[in-house]
C-alpha cells in the first residue's frame, strides 16, 4: 500500500509539474506559446525598412530582422510551428497597437528616444538617421530659416513633426505645419506643390526621392533638425523575458555579420518592386553599433 501511495504521489507531482513549468512563461512569450502565433506590425511605405511590394506583401530591412526574431522566439519556445500574423500600423497607431496587445513587434522605421522609452521598449539599434527636409531644387530653399512662413509637411505622430514645430517656435519662423497621415502622402504634397518641403528622416526622404517620377528635381537638406537618431524594433515595455530573447537574437544577428548582409541587400542593391538602388553603404557609426549592440536612446552614444 505504501509503495502504491508513493507511486501515486510521484505521478501527481509529475502531472502538477508540467503546468507549473508552463506557467513560468509570462507576458508576450506566454501569449505566443498559448496561441501559437506572433503578430508583426508593418508600415506600407517606409522604404526600404517596411513597405508593400507589388503583391501587397510587407517586405524590407526591418521585416527581415523581425523574421529573424520570430525564428529565435520559435526556438526559445520549442515550437514546431509558429504562425506569423501581419498587422498594418502608422506613425500614430504603432504605440497604441503595441500597448494594447494587437501587435507583438513593430517592424518599421521607428526612432528610439527617451520620451518613447517611457511607453515602450526597443531592441538593439539597426539604423542611424537624422531629421532633414526635402524640397524641389526650383524652390531655392537652402536652409531651415528659408522655410519661414511657408507650408511645410511632416508625418503625423513622428518625432520629425515635433522637431519641426520646436524649430519653428525657437527661431520664430511661423512655419505653416501640415500633418500628413503617412510618408507617401507627405511627399506627394511636395511633388504637387502643396508644401514647399517635407521634414522626415533623411534615409526615408532618399528612398522617396529615388522612387519618384523625377528624382533630379529634388534636393535633401544639409541642415538637420536633430543629432543622429537610432532606429530599433519596438516591443512592449516591462516584459523582460521577451526582451531578453529579442535582444539576444538581434545581437547575434548584428555581431555575427548576417546583419550587415541584410543591410547591404536593402541599401546597396536593387530592391523590389521597381529595382531602386539607394546606394547608402553602411557607415562607421553603424558598424560600431553592430560590433557592440545597444538599445540606447542617447544620440551622443553613437560615435
Image (spheres, rainbow, N blue to C red):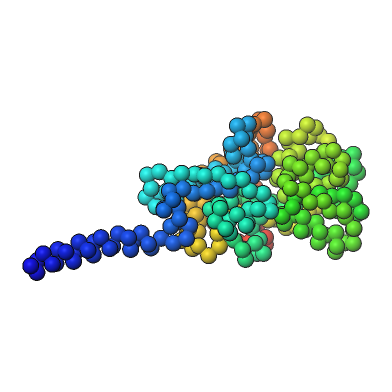
Q: Residue at x 41, y 60 (%)?
A: 25
Q: Residue at x 71, y 40 (%)?
A: 207
**253 displayed left or right of 214:** left
Q: Position of residue 169 (x, y in %)?
A: 85, 62
Q: Position of residue 268 (x, y in %)?
A: 63, 37
Residue 263 visible within the image: no
Q: Position of residue 67 (x, y in %)?
A: 51, 44
Q: Is residue 142 above or below residue 19?
A: above
Name the quadrant containing residue 86.
Answer: top right
The C terminus lies in quadrant: bottom right
**271 displayed left or right of 167:** left
Residue 274 visible within the image: yes
The N terminus lies in quadrant: bottom left
Q: Is residue 245 above or below residue 63?
A: below
Which residue in the rendered view is the most extreme toward the bottom?
A: 2
Q: Residue at x 40, y 43 (%)?
A: 81
Q: Nearer the viewer, residue 12 or 142?
A: 12
Q: Position of residue 167 (x, y in %)?
A: 83, 60
**63 displayed left or right of 27:** right
Q: Residue at x 46, y 48 (%)?
A: 37
**205 displayed left or right of 136:** left
Q: How many marks?
A: 0
Amino acid at each position: 500500500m505504501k509503495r502504491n501511495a508513493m507511486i501515486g504521489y510521484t505521478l501527481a507531482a509529475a502531472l502538477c509539474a508540467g503546468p507549473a513549468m508552463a506557467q513560468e512563461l509570462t507576458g508576450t512569450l506566454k501569449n505566443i506559446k498559448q496561441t501559437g502565433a506572433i503578430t508583426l506590425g508593418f508600415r506600407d511605405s517606409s522604404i526600404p525598412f517596411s513597405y508593400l511590394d507589388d503583391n501587397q506583401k510587407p517586405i524590407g530591412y526591418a521585416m527581415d530582422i523581425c523574421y529573424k526574431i520570430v525564428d529565435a522566439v520559435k526556438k526559445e519556445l520549442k515550437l514546431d510551428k509558429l504562425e506569423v500574423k501581419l498587422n498594418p500600423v502608422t506613425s500614430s497607431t504603432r504605440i497604441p497597437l503595441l500597448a494594447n496587445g494587437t501587435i507583438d513587434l513593430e517592424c518599421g522605421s521607428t526612432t528610439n528616444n527617451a520620451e518613447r522609452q517611457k511607453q515602450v521598449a526597443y531592441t538593439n539599434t539597426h539604423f542611424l538617421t537624422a531629421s532633414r527636409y526635402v524640397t524641389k531644387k526650383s524652390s531655392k530653399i537652402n536652409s531651415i530659416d528659408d522655410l519661414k512662413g511657408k507650408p511645410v509637411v511632416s508625418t503625423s505622430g513622428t518625432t520629425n513633426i515635433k522637431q519641426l514645430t520646436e524649430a519653428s517656435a525657437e527661431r520664430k519662423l511661423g512655419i505653416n505645419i501640415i500633418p500628413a497621415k503617412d510618408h507617401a502622402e507627405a511627399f506627394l504634397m511636395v511633388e504637387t506643390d502643396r508644401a514647399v518641403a517635407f521634414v522626415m528622416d533623411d534615409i526615408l526622404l532618399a528612398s522617396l526621392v529615388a522612387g519618384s517620377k523625377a528624382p533630379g528635381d529634388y534636393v535633401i537638406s544639409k541642415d538637420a533638425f536633430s543629432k543622429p537618431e537610432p532606429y530599433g524594433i519596438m516591443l512592449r515595455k516591462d516584459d523582460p523575458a521577451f526582451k531578453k530573447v529579442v535582444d539576444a537574437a538581434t545581437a547575434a544577428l548584428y555581431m555575427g555579420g548576417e546583419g550587415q548582409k541584410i543591410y547591404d541587400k536593402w541599401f546597396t542593391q536593387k530592391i523590389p518592386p521597381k529595382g531602386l538602388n539607394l546606394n547608402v553603404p553602411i557607415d562607421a557609426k553603424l558598424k560600431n553599433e553592430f560590433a557592440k549592440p545597444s538599445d540606447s536612446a542617447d544620440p551622443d552614444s553613437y560615435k
